[in-house]
Amino acid sequence: MPPALSGSTTRCLGTRRRAVVLTLAALVAATAHARDADPQDAKTLGQVNVTATSTLDLYRANEANTGALGPRSLLDTPFSIDTVTADLLQNRQALDINDAFAASPGVTPLGTGYAGEAAGIAVRGLQVDSLNGFKMDGLSIPNWGSDMPLEPFSQIELLKGPGGFMYGFGQPGGILNFVSKQPTLQPYTSFTLGYVSDSVFKEAVDLGGTFGGQGGWGYRINLAHEDGDTFVDGGHIKRNAASLALTKDIAPNLHWHFNSIYQDRDVRGAYYGIILGQDYGMATGVRVPAPLDGDQRVSQPFTGYQTSFRVANTGVKWDISPDWNFSVDYSYARQTRENHDSAIILTDNQGSYTDLNYLGYSVYNYQQWQGMFSGKFETGSIRHDVVFGASWQGLDEHYPLDFADQVLGEGDIYNIPVFANPNVAVGHGNYLAESTTQRALFASDTVTFSSQWSALLGLRTMDYDDKTFNAGSPAVVARYEKSPLTPTAALIYKPIAQVSLYASYVQSLEQGGSAPQTAVNAYQTFAPTISKQFEVGAKTEFDTWSTNLALFRVDRGLQYLNSDNVYVQNGQTRYQGIDLSTQMSLAKDWTLIGGVMYLDATNVRAAADVDGKRAYSAPRVQGNLYVEYAVPQLPGLVLNAGGRYVGNEAVEADNSNFVGAYHTFDIGARYSTTLGSHAITYRAGIDNLTNEKYWLTNWGFMLNQGTPRTVRASMTLTL
């Protein structure tokens, strides 16, 4: 299926809705059957695009970018990596990162992008680092509390666990790498109309081609617009996104590329989070209330949250010989956040709350240079695949110069009142609060002893420099410098070509905790810590099924909000468990993706009130499943269903409160056919079919509503 965009649209807005409905009806009336085909894989047969690629092959990737290791076969990579392709994103009508990894075990939702500030995930109980855990084409980008646009990307790769050697500094929750769609050799155009309840509409276009044939000027353009009332009562979203990718062969062995994205996103009626009174220092003994309906309004319609992305990277690759190449890349990324949203502070167990509205404007600027030299050679019967590289990264964090909060009113969370709008503008003044630089050298050698045995040895040496500043002064008030070595080592055994058994060890330096804006010591930062991971696993990759089974243990520093509402860094948390994921074709008509995780996450060597307690936001058990059935009696019709179970989770580090376990079920269908000589696909689905009410929790003190029953529909026409 063409890697175009997903859905969104629904409760309908007069003329616009009628135009969309009439367009869909006209197209349905004119259609006749054909299968989906990727624009780069499709072949022309008469006027119908066909492909022999199976659905499973469209949904699974064989290779991923592994940072300092370069592009690498997943089967031969001794770490757990989940990948999501554009085809799966489109057919699931994914809106955000929660949807993207809905079938991945061990990936737990932390928030939603319509009711709250943004979607977010934890991996094996560990939240992905907002400032160091997101990459685009392998290079660092900031993503603090925002939803990345999904339209520009052909694949999203999730490295589970620390990425210290491969990517440098970062929390051990994992690395999310967004891979840009690349130019097509032949002209390609697709249009998508989408709908999400209540009445969010989306229009998107995906254009690709190459001027001058192979090696000429290649281009890929994606444009998307999303606008309408969200499923939250009184909520609204407006989003505009664009991307541009260019390629050109400067010489037969010298290749240039450029990738960029732009997005402006504004969500009205969204809130920062629901916080129990004692976790904000306002009351004691407040318990987690019964879950609210996911579409219930919690904040005021005039409050909201705005973010923007401006990202661009470019580079050249020099193929020195068939066995050796050199590449150099540069990336610049800028994210802005405008808070005009509220913290909902519960003050008793009857649902009373205070609406505390935050006002502030933050800016994050990230730059990175990276050069890599890779190749292979043999010493006798032993083969060496080596990588040498150097990297520089700089991150500047600008916090609000005139951050303010205001009490909008008090009310009952079960009967939300409407407060007067104070009409206070958000000031855009900010100051450089923290500046971090990383200078690194790295090298690795994958040593292949035979067709069955190989080993990986890698080492990154880093000069890390972190400086913090006070508002209105260029003087450094705190500085932390360190030059750590972050090694990785692994042993791989392949009894047969399609099976890989491995054991691996990796270290990672991660930034110390930063106190949230709700803490007494808001924005205070702490010294970096070292995280460690041990993993033993097995991978398979056959024609009709792939699996990844991993036993893992991660030790990382513990950061939490204590009973005095002070954010502290003290002790460790140990995450250990088992993670099984699979992708398979059952007979020729069934495709299955899913898995299970068991996790034991415990605080150790910590203060008495948290020692031995479960880690917050870490379920013990989680299961995920997505199934498709291609109806043989009606070619082109595919039915699908999905489900997710998440066990209960601690809200705070001292386990004073838990949110309950929950399960959701999704159903849907798509129909692929032709409109004249052009492929067209219709999709429809219902998420959270039973309208399960549940809480999401993150940061060790915050609650967010789960997504309610949601209708999605979309149509993609490929020219």
Image (cartoon, rainbow, N blue to C red):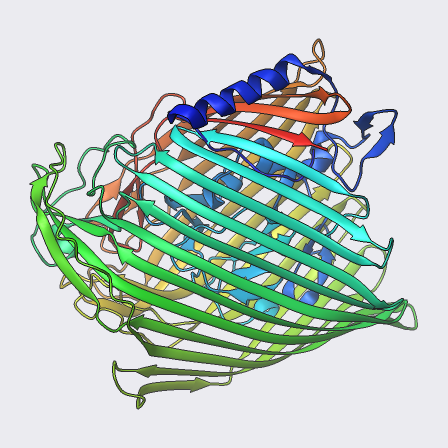
- Asked whether residue 612 is in view, the answer is no
Q: Position of residue 9 (x, y in %)?
A: 45, 30
Residue 631 occupies quadrant = top right
Q: Is residue 164 left or right of residue 322?
A: left
Q: Between residues 351 and 528, which one lies in front from this camera angle?
A: 351
Q: Residue at x 26, y 82 (%)?
A: 470
Q: Is residue 388 left or right of residue 83?
A: right
Q: Residue at x 68, y 40 (%)?
A: 60
Q: Is residue 563 above or below residue 355?
A: below
The residue lying furthest to the bottom in this view is: 475
Q: Is residue 290 above or below residue 33?
A: below
Q: Between residues 118 and 82, which one lies in front from this camera angle?
A: 118
Q: Residue at x 40, y 75 (%)?
A: 528
Q: Between residues 457 and 113, which one lies in front from this camera angle?
A: 113
Residue 527 occupies quadrant = bottom left
Q: Position of residue 43 (x, y in %)?
A: 85, 34
Classify the position of the C terminus by image quarter: top right
- Asked whether residue 258 is in view, the answer is yes
Q: Is residue 338 left or right of residue 121?
A: left
Q: Is residue 605 left or right of residue 446?
A: left
The residue lying furthest to the front in this view is: 15
Classify the position of the N terminus by image quarter: top right
Q: Position of residue 388 (x, y in %)?
A: 72, 77
Q: Is residue 463 above or below residue 300?
A: below
Q: How many marks?
A: 0
Q: Position of residue 85 (x, y in %)?
A: 64, 42
Q: Is residue 327 above or below residue 5?
A: below
The residue lying furthest to the top in this view is: 633
